[in-house]
Amino acid sequence: MIELSDRIKSMEESATIAMSRKSRELNAMGKDVISLSLGEPDFNTPDFIKDAAKQGMDQNYTKYMAVPGYEDLRESISKKFLRDNKLIYSTDQIVVSTGAKQSIANVVLTLINPGDEVIIPCPYWVSYIEIVKLAGGVPIFVPSGIENDFKITGEQLQNAITEKTKLMIFSTPCNPTGSVYSKNELEGLAHVIENNSSLMVICDEIYEHINFIGKHQSLAQFSNVYNQVITVNGVSKAWAMTGWRLGYIGAPKEIAAACTKMQGQFTSGTSSISQRAAIAAMDADPNVLQSMIQSFKSRRDLVLAKLSTMEGVKINEPEGAFYVFPDISSFFGKSDGNIIIKNASDLCVYLLSEALVALVTGDAFGDPNCIRISYAASEEVLKKALSRVEDALLKLK
C-alpha cells in the first residue's frame, strides 16, 4: 500500500484548477459548459514575442543557463522595473522562475520556519495559503470586505502583527477581487512595515498592467521599506503568456541569492525559449497593451451592468485584473426545491449543474460570502453565461 506524506495529504487542490477540471469533464460528456473560473487571458501571445522565441531557437538558446536566468533577460527586467515602477533592482537582485507562483514559493521557503506567522489579507489568491503551510508557516488572516473594496488599512495590519510575524503576502491589482491599492493606501501600509523591521512583504504585482485607473503603484517605491519588500511579477497576464511559465522577483540581494540556491535544487533555470521571448516583452513599450486593457475594461463594465440588475447580488467596482467578486450571501438558505444553498460553494455547484456556468467559490479565497467571476472571455460568451446565471438565481426562493 502506498502511503503518501502528511504534507501532500494536507494540501488542498487549487480551487480554480479543480473547477476548470470539472468543466472539462462536463464538456467531454457533451455539456455546453461555459467556464469563467480560470484567470487566463483569451488573447494570444503577441507575434513579436513569438518571433523572439523562434529567433532564440534558431540561435540555439537550448542549453542549460544560469539558475536565476540569462543575464540579458535580467538586465531587461531591471530596465523594466526602472521604466515602469521607478524601482532600482540590479541584476543580482532579480531571479527568474517558472512562473510567479514559483517565485512566491521560493521566497516563502527561504524565509519561513515552522511556526512563523504570515499575514495574508483576505480575500487572497488561492495558492498563498498552501505555500505557507508547505513551509510550516501559520497563516494569519486579515479580513477586508466589499464595503472597503477588499483592501486592508495600516491599522488592521498593525493589529495583526505579533512577535512571531515574519512575512506578509498580498497582491495589487488583486486576484480574486480586482482591487488596486492607491499610492496613499500603500503608504499607510509602508508606515507600519517600517516600524516592524523584521517584517518582510511579498507584493504580488502580476496584474500590474491590467489596471483601469492609470499608473500602477508598487510598495517598494517607498524608500523606507524598499529593503523589506520582494516585488513579484511575470509575463502570464498582461502579455498573454500563461503557457510560457515565466515569473520573476526583485528583492534584497540576500533573498535573491537564497532563492537562487533554492531554485537550483528544485528546477534550475526556467525554459530557455521562454526567457528569450520574455526579453521582447520586457523591452516593449507597455502602451502596446492598451487595446487589450480597453477590452478588459469593456468586459468589466458589461459584467457589472448585468450583475447590478440581479436582485440579491452585491457588487463593487474593481479597478484592475479581470475578475469581479460579488457578495452572494443573500442566497444562503434559499432553495430551488431540490437543494438548499448553504454557502458560496453550494451556489457554485448549483450554477454549474443548473446553468452550466463554472465559477469559483469565495471560500477558496478566504471570503465565504462571495464568488469569483473571471471576465477573461469574449463579450458574447459573458452575456450568454450571465443570462444563464440570472435565470438560475431566479429559481432560488
Image: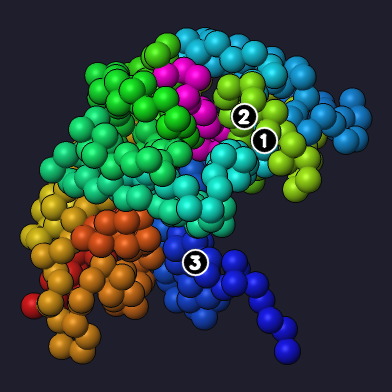
Q: Nearer the viewer, mark 3 or mark 1?
A: 1
User: On the image, which quarter does residue 164 sit in?
Assistant: top left
Residues at discs 2 and 1 in contact (Cβ within 8 Å): yes
Q: Nearer the viewer, mark 2 or mark 3?
A: 2
Q: Under tag 2, what secondary structure? A: helix
Q: Residue type at mark 3? A: Glu
Q: Earlier in the sequence, mark 3 or mark 1?
A: 3
Q: Which residues are magenta?
A: 225-240
| Residue corresponding to mark 1 | 259
Q: Residue 362 versus residue 293: which sits nearer the camera?
A: 362
Is 352 displayed left or right of 75 in the figure? Answer: left
Q: Residue type at mark 1? A: Cys
Q: Earlier in the sequence, mark 2 or mark 3?
A: 3
Q: Is residue 239 magenta?
A: yes
Question: Residue 165: x and y, percent?
Answer: 40, 41
Is 221 placed above or below 24 here? above
| Residue corresponding to mark 2 | 255
Crowd band around label 2 with a 10 angstrom C-alpha radius: few (<14), some (14–19), many (20+): many
Q: Residue 260 versus residue 150: which sits nearer the camera?
A: 260
Question: Residue 261: x and y, percent?
Answer: 74, 36
